[in-house]
Image (cartoon, rainbow, N blue to C red):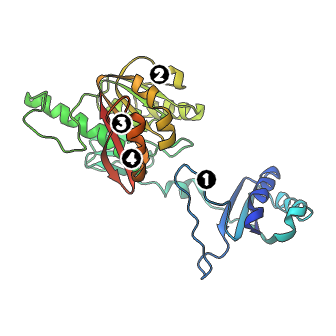
Amino acid sequence: MFELILLAPVDEVETLSDALEALDALSVSVEDADAHTADEQALFGEPGMPPPQAGWARSRVVALFATGALAQSAGRVLFAQDFFAHCRVVALQAVPDQDWVRLTQAQFAPVEITPTFWIVPTWHVPPAQARQVIRLDPGLAFGTGTHPTTRMCLRWIAGGAQAAILDLALGTPNAGARPAPADLALRRLGRVLDYGCGSGILAIGAAKFGAEQVDAVDIDPAAVEATRANAEANHIELHAGLPDCASGLYHTVLANILATPLKVLAPLLCAHLAPGGHLVLAGILSRQADELVAAYSPYLRLKVSNEEEGWILMTAER
């Protein structure tokens, strides 16, 4: 592997990045060339939204190539382009060989959802206290349990299911004698729809906590395949497919996406929710709560049930 490192003004970053990809770069990354100096510039975009600009005033563009010859050829082609007049090549260097698999795996450790419920990569041994485990490796699809939105959804699934089981064991199926915390609904999961399933982690969690049937759908075929593979690895039976596979009414509808698509999907998701059923939405920033309440008000009364690191979990009951 070889890196071609370039310096570019902000106006040329996007053009330069597109050109590098066309020249067979395996990856292209953009960094602040003035990072860790007095001229360092903060540049943030909202989750799910593009950043306010393509790069920094002085951007360091790093392109990774399979061979040194490809990197050299790319540099020569770029030098001849008009847009490259204010750019320059900083370096062309070999990338040291590393065990990339082991390096990637080292970034992922077991994730605690509750003290007894954990997400554990296949190369780790589950913690001794884990009674319920989802085996999940990082892949192309979103959802490894490390993001607050995923953790809150799984905590909702685990908490409510465990509480309902306890109530049944105590002979109090309606839970009238025991008040519930604000973020804990006493319920049976019943028939479950995971809309925008990503890796399938929520669908698998629902199946492990007693769902009668689970349908997991996503617009991305890669996510559907990831869900099927992860379900098989966890010895879980579910049905995964594209969105048109969702049919009929569900006792639980889960959707961990982002605020904008969740607003658009309000009629569809609510149409799939059975009487007495629970809607669980995530991928929402705290400041977006009112937007979601308004979008769902014609159908359900949505409320904030949990919050973590600036993200919220919103739920409703039909």
Q: CA distance from mark 1 to mark 3?
A: 26 Å
Q: Which mark is residue 289?
A: 4
Q: Earlier in the sequence, mark 1 or mark 3?
A: 1
Give the mark toward the camera: 1 or 2: 1
Write down the residue under mark 2. 246
Write down the residue under mark 1. 50
Give the mark toward the camera: 4 or 1: 4
Q: Residue at 81% across / 50% down in the picture?
A: 22
Write down the residue under mark 3. 280
Residue 175: quarter of image? top left
In the image, residue 289 above or below residue 76: above
Residue 223 coordinates in the image, percent (x, y) = 54, 35
Q: Earlier in the sequence, mark 1 or mark 2?
A: 1
Q: CA distance from mark 2 to mark 3?
A: 16 Å
In the image, residue 171 above or below residue 34: above
Q: Earlier in the sequence, mark 4 or mark 1?
A: 1
Residue 114 coordinates in the image, percent (x, y) = 28, 47
Residue 1 coordinates in the image, percent (x, y) = 73, 59
Instruction: Check disc 1: other Cα within 10 Å, few if <14, some if 14-19, many if 20+.
Output: few
What is the quadrant of the C terminus in the image? top left
Give the mark toward the camera: 2 or 4: 4
Residue 105 coordinates in the image, percent (x, y) = 50, 54
Residue 275 appears left or right of 149: left
